Amino acid sequence: SEYFNLLEIPPLNEQQDESAESFRSIPADIIPNLKSLQIIDSGVEKCQEINSALSEVDFQLVGASIYIYYKENIIPSFSQLIWKYPKRTIVKNGDNTEEWLDKGCLEDFKQYIISLEEKGIVSDQCITNDIILPHHDEADDDMVMPPHPTQCTDPQIPFTHYLQGFRFGFAQGLNNEQLKQYISRVGAFNGYIFYFNAKGNQIGNSYSGLFIGWEKVDDQQYWIVIEKQLDDG
């Protein structure tokens, strides 16, 4: 695993770091129309790996990050990440070595992250998330992965890759100040909030979502969170 010193990353806005009274990485008027945060067609459930990305909010995190860094409102093509996944990957963790094979829509443990970090991601308009890949519910049992795409399905659409070279990060046990440091530097953070009393005992309910900022109202601090919603229910 690689470790990074978060404080070496400059704030997205030089005028607003973790000491600011308020900060948001996505303007309030943009959020209702951000395509990656809308209810996604249930057809993607036929590809287990894309469905997993949706349920774990990685799909929404990637889409929000594309807006934050590129100011473009797109639906990310996770089918393209699966399509471009290496046929064989060796994973070393200390003395342990694992071999991960390309299994199309049956990928596990977020293997799409490897494709994203190495090659970036295109839009759903370029390569649709509805495309049928091996182990898709509608794929033939003997289907093999087709050659990697080198252009969009419609050649008139630019084959633009986003977030190439970016990294997924994982952290836990953050206090309020540390979470502000994360948000002000990376823009969006998918996580859970737990509340504790003075004795260190957890109280109340936890909640999860996409943390994109904070604000102070009447001397009270509030997190700005896009809550997870996967269907109309």
Image: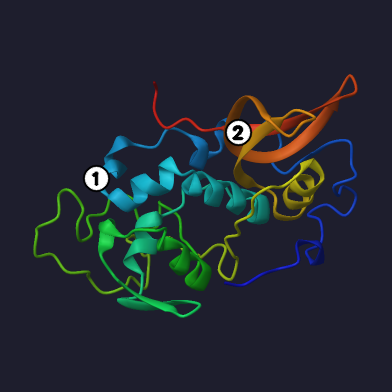
On the image, the x and y values in percent for residue 161 come to: 51, 65
Residue 186, relative to residue 226: is it above or below?
Answer: below
Characterize the local packing of mark 2: few (<14), some (14-19) or many (20 or more) Cα atoms within 10 angstroms: some
- Which mark is on residue 128? none
Residue 173, relative to residue 229: is it above or below?
Answer: below
Q: Quadrant of the C terminus?
A: top left
Q: Residue at x 44, y 68 (%)?
A: 115
Q: Earlier in the sequence, mark 2 or mark 1?
A: 1
The residue that mark 2 highlights is 226
Between residue 159 and residue 89, name the one nearer to us. 89
6 lies left or right of 85: right
On the image, the x and y values in percent for residue 83 come to: 32, 65
Residue 11 found in image quarter: bottom right
Characterize the local packing of mark 1: few (<14), some (14-19) or many (20 or more) Cα atoms within 10 angstroms: some
132 lies left or right of 12: left
- Residue type at mark 2 is Ile
The residue that mark 1 highlights is 46
On the image, the x and y values in percent for residue 125 come to: 40, 52
Secondary structure, mark 2, is strand
175 lies left or right of 167: right
- Residue type at mark 1 is Lys
Q: Residue at x 83, y 52 (%)?
A: 13
On the image, the x and y values in percent for residue 18 come to: 85, 47
